[in-house]
Image: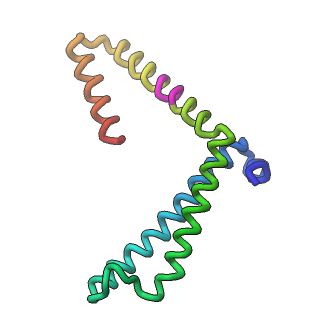
Amino acid sequence: MAQELAAEHNVTPHEALLGLVRTASARAAWTDTIIANAMREHVDAGGSPLKPPQELVPWLKQSREERKLAATTAKQAVDAGVMVALERRLDLEGELVAAALGAALDAIELTHEQRVAALEAAQGRLLEAG
């Protein structure tokens, strides 16, 4: 499946598998959001939080199926080495960003204290995003 998807979208099989993992995870999250909203409405209307309304039964089944599909797809991606490749790429991108930041700070000839303050600000932003 990943081979066909890769050829269709002109990406590597690893990228195709990673896209399938993201799609499966997003669908599982979407289904769970529908269930959570419906349960909130059910409870707000006086229903039991331990007994979902009958109309949620198909959504609960769909949620289980989506999670199972997401887990299976993730396992295939791990087996194919996608996660190792993704980690390697993220590490390289992180090193590139760090080198670029260092070069920019070198170019503007900051004092040691200013350089430390700039690096601390960058680190703080990354931790917030993180």
| Quadrant housing residue 78 | top right
Q: Is residue 63 above or below residue 68?
A: below
Which residue is at 57% across, 31% downward?
89
Whether the magenta-drawn stretch holds residue 93 is answered as yes
Q: Position of residue 61 (x, y in %)?
A: 54, 75
Which is nearer the eye, 33 or 7? 33
Which residue is at 52% across, 32% downward?
90
Q: Give the range drawn in magenta.
A: 91-95
Q: Where is residue 56 in the image (x, y as percent from the top left)?
A: 46, 82
Q: Position of residue 74 (x, y in %)?
A: 60, 50
| Outermost residue toward the front in this view | 50
Q: In this view, does 92 lie above or below 61?
A: above
Which is nearer the eye, 19 or 97? 19
Q: Is residue 17 left or right of residue 38?
A: right
Which residue is at 29% across, 83% downward?
43
Q: Is residue 39 above or below residue 71?
A: below
Q: Where is residue 116 in the image (x, y as percent from the top left)?
A: 25, 18
Q: What is the total number of numbered labels drawn onto the structure image?
A: 0
Q: In this view, does 44 lie to the left or right of 23?
A: left
Q: Is residue 108 left or right of residue 73?
A: left
Q: Main secondary structure of the magenta part?
A: helix
Q: Quadrant of the C terminus?
A: top left
Q: Quadrant of the N terminus?
A: bottom right
Which residue is at 62% across, 49% downward?
75
| Outermost residue toward the left in this view | 113
Q: In this view, does 49 lie to the left or right of 22?
A: left
Whether the magenta-drawn stretch holds residue 76 is answered as no
